[in-house]
Image (cartoon, helix red, strand yellow):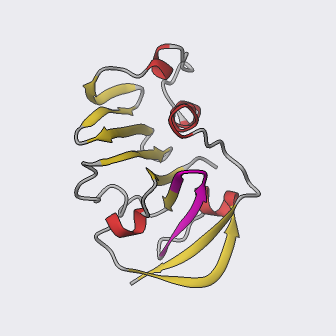
Amino acid sequence: MGWNTSALFVADHDPLTLLTATTTATAEETDGAEATSGLRHDVVYTARTGQWHELWDPSLEHVMSVPDLAGHRALSVIFSSVTSSYGFSYHDGPTPARRIVYTDGQPVVDDGVPLPVEQGLTFPDWGPDEDFVWAVIEEITGITFDADRRYQVHQLC
């Protein structure tokens, strides 16, 4: 099974406050495997690792509709094995520093100067995939995939 989700990482700021959707915290927690690759579309998942707040959105809808990340150090990512689309948008303060999205191995969005982490990556024959996105996440936030990390479940209202 491939990855089909999106995520928002924000330094020192709760990403729930940036969503256009309203959420309600539940008493439910889940592990990293469910939060980062689950199939529920009625919830988002949050965790905090150091200064970075994570929000995972398996619907691919709410992270992509955050209206403005200006003023935040933030990274939004998309994993879509269904459409063979992978990419990220990185903000380092008032303006986007880098945005790139690949579909079927070809860049369809390519703004800003490539980040150093992009320079050292080699892609499989089919192009960038989840390994590319995770390399960017780790380089910027220091966060790696951890199936045992605990995530709070938030119901979308």
Q: Nearer the viewer, residue 146 or 97?
A: 97
Above or below for 94 versus 108: below
Magenta stretch encompasses residue 52: yes
Residue 36 located left or right of residue 59: right
Magenta stretch encompasses residue 51: yes
Quarter of the image for residue 36 reads bottom right
Q: Nearer the viewer, residue 135 or 42?
A: 135
Residue 30 located left or right of residue 129: right
> Which residue is outermost to the right?
148
Residue 143 located left or right of residue 80: right
Quarter of the image for residue 153 reads bottom right
Residue, x 57% and y 20% (percent of image)? Answer: 124
- Figure label count: 0
Q: Nearer the viewer, residue 145 or 87?
A: 145
Inspect this view and state whether residue 9 appears: no
Measuring from the top left, give residue 70's x and y in whole percent.
24, 48
Inspect this view and state whether residue 102 appears: yes
Measuring from the top left, give residue 118's x and y in whole percent.
46, 20
Residue, x 22% and y 39% (percent of image)? Answer: 95
Measuring from the top left, give residue 132's x and y in whole percent.
53, 30
Residue, x 51% and y 24% (percent of image)? Answer: 126
Above or below for 57 versus 108: below
Residue, x 41% and y 37% (percent of image)? Answer: 87
Magenta highlight range = 43-53
- Assign the magenta stretch its main secondary structure: strand
User: Which image quarter holds the C terminus?
Assistant: bottom left
